[in-house]
Image: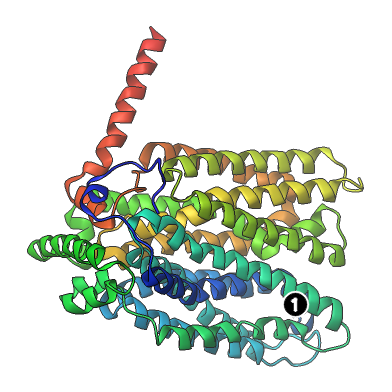
Amino acid sequence: MPSPTAPLTKGALTLPPLTEGPHNKRLGLISVVACLGGLLFGYDTGVTNGAEGPMAQELGLSLFQLGVVVSSLVFAAAFGALICGPISDAIGRRPTIILLSILFFTGTLLVVFSPHAGIGEFSPVGFGILVTGRIMLGLAVGGASTIVPVYLAELAPYEIRGSITGRNELAIVSGQLAAFVINAIILSTLHGTVEGVWRIMFAVCALPAVALFIGMLRMPESPRWLVGKGRHEEALAILKTIRSPERADAEIGEVEHIAEEEDTASRSGFGAIFSSKWIFRLVLVGMGVAMAQQLTGINSIMYYGTRVLEESGMSADQSIYANISFGVMAVLGGLIALRNMDRLDRRKTFTIGFSLTTICHVLIAIAAWVLPEDHGLRPVVIMILVAAFVLSMQTFLNIATWVYLAEIFPLHIRGLGIGISVFFGWGINGFVSLLFPSLVSGVGISISFLIFAVIGVFALLFIVTQLPETRGRSLEEFEEDVNTGEVFKDLTGRQARRKRLAQRAAH
């Protein structure tokens, strides 16, 4: 139900209120099944954080080759996001997610069964198969990061859209935590006695891939996508399974009204982006949000957390177990974020998040600089500060980013818009994950996190000056204001007020 403090909007005044009933359970089931895509996303990105050591040792990988294995998934995810967005606009959200489940499963098989010449001996063929599998997983991860939030946002009522869509990010960090815990269990019980323990770590993610495939076969298509394709009766029938009859009738009318305006305008694909300065500006905003999230360095911790802890002074065994704390903080922050997503404005959430993460970066840099490498407290202090960074990131930025990207684009380019945004986000992620091991080894923890802090200041300025608010508005209402440029007028008003106040202060 909407928060008591949620702002009243046109959508809030015209749509009947939400009611309890079987439709709520149906919506909950759909979100659980779809979020298996997020779980796979999280496990596949987190499993290397612990598996990278045994994998490099068995396959004879250099530091750069290891970076290629890890970052190949991330770069492929960028293209997966860009490709799968338009595909979902064309064939639907549901069949696209089903195709992604097949990609997850196939990529896992290639990684698990990649051959090697002998323990510690590099095999070009095995390396090629391993990277190919990681690329397939990356395409699936990128596609899931794009389509699942859109699917959930289009199914959810606007009053609880933040918490419903945000469940996918909670699934992502839960998958990463599961990877950290499973890695620790496998390494503590099998490492040294069973060959190829890292293959077992990767094999686990085949199970949720199968579950996602079977589950999505029984899930409905997005009603909003169906309306966009002129299939109004199907859309209404599906909407009535996840809303009360009165709410479904009113909501479908609003969706159809916007869809008719889009048909009249005859806009689609990249042409729609360049035909409207407001949509073009919104795409730039989406790109900026996605890149700013990645430039916090959060995924450097989720991919290489054990390496950071080792650089801080922990042993390899200690870092494996301590790394679990980062996953716990991510899940805890995700739970807090879900509670707040429909209570706090998106802009306020982002502002708090970038302020806290930048402060954490500075504190980590100071701790690494001040405490000598042989000081007993150094690894503990750095671990606590990194855990605080992960908690801040997850509570205020990660879930908010994916929810926001799923909300801001008009229906006719929603898949394409989020695909472009996430493409740039994953691209930045790829470069950071490729260079981070060498960066930490070369300049140390202090300088590495100081760089993240400087970037965080610029990200905060971008958020404060460029982001339109989406909370408490239906997707159709926000879309209507995008078409007229109304969404940016509030920003202009705030900027003008700040300029007048600054001038008064100067005089």
Would residue 147 appear left or right of 315 to someone viewing this image? Answer: left
Residue 149 visible from this viewpoint: yes
Where is residue 303 shown, x and y percent of the image?
A: 66, 65
Q: Residue at x 48, y 44 (%)?
A: 350
In the picture of the structure, the residue carrying the numbered disc 1 is 56
* Figure check: 60 above or below 410: below
Would residue 29 appear left or right of 123 to someone viewing this image? Answer: left
The quadrant in which residue 464 appears is top left
Where is residue 46 shown, x and y percent of the image?
A: 64, 69
The quadrant of the image that shows the N terminus is bottom left
Would residue 184 appear left or right of 438 to someone viewing this image? Answer: right
| Element under disc 1 | helix
Q: Amino acid at mark 1?
A: Ala
Where is residue 158 shown, x and y percent of the image?
A: 33, 56
**Extreme residue in the top direction:** 507
Q: Residue at x 32, y 18 (%)?
A: 500
**Extreme residue in the left direction:** 264
The quadrant in which residue 220 appears is bottom left
